[in-house]
Amino acid sequence: MAEEEVKTPVEEAPQEQTQEEKAPKPKKKKVKRSVPFGQVHVLATFNNTIVTVTDQKGGALTNSSAGACGFRGSKKGTAYAAQVAAEKAIESAKQHFGLSKANVFIKGVGLGRDSAVRALQAANISVDMIQDVTGIPHGGTRPKKVRRP
């Protein structure tokens, strides 16, 4: 019985801390960011198309891909899937950030290259520049050894 009545200060200390933690903390209001001029990066591979909308420095605002829009398998690599992905990313950027002008950077050799840019123009985004940033090998990898007869 004596053990039950004795309380150590170690047991009381956590109760005081939890009461302090329960006090409501003031929340900061989230400032709505306005980005009227940005960049649109289109990665068009044979299997998928990824569209990312960024600000001038390259910080991502929104993104979308053919796979995220519900296309599966070989349909992800089609031009229509790229168009839908671009429309989704651009509409989100227009609503949340007020995007109106953009530079376009295209990377890759897939079918979605042209249709993504057309979707931009259809969404009333003025395109200032279109640049192809597809990587080109400088010498490439080492060739296979010559086959002997």
Image (cartoon, rainbow, N blue to C red):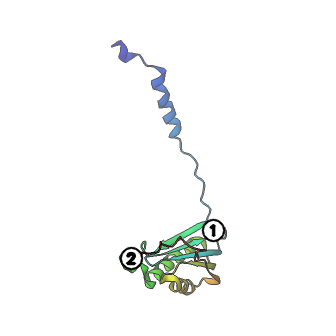
**As shown in the figure, which amino acid type bears the numbered disc 1?**
Gly
* Residue position marked by numbered label 2 in the rendering: 71
Q: Nearer the viewer, residue 43 or 21?
A: 43
Q: Nearer the viewer, residue 95 or 121?
A: 121
The image shows residue 54 at horizontal and vertical percentages of: 60, 70
* Residue position marked by numbered label 1 in the rendering: 58
Picture quarter with the N terminus: top left
The image shows residue 63 at horizontal and vertical percentages of: 52, 71
Please tell me which residue is depicted at 47% across the width and 23% down the height of the picture. 10
The answer, for residue 122, to whether it is visible in the render is yes
Q: Left or right: 142 with respect to 131?
A: left
Secondary structure found at label 1: loop
Picture quarter with the C terminus: bottom left
To which quarter of the image does residue 42 belong? bottom right
The image shows residue 59 at horizontal and vertical percentages of: 61, 66
Which residue is the extreme one toward the top? 2
First in sequence: mark 2 vs mark 1: 1
Please tell me which residue is depicted at 56% across the width and 46% down the height of the picture. 25
Q: Nearer the viewer, residue 131 or 2?
A: 131
Above or below, comparing residue 23 to residue 122 in the picture: above
Please tell me which residue is depicted at 53% across the width and 36% down the height of the picture. 20
Q: Left or right: 42 with respect to 38?
A: left
Distance from the alpha carbon under mark 2 to that under mark 1: 27 Å
Q: Nearer the viewer, residue 141 or 124?
A: 141
Please tell me which residue is depicted at 39% across the width and 74% down the height of the picture. 70
Above or below, comparing residue 114 to residue 66 in the picture: below
Q: Left or right: 67 with respect to 113?
A: left
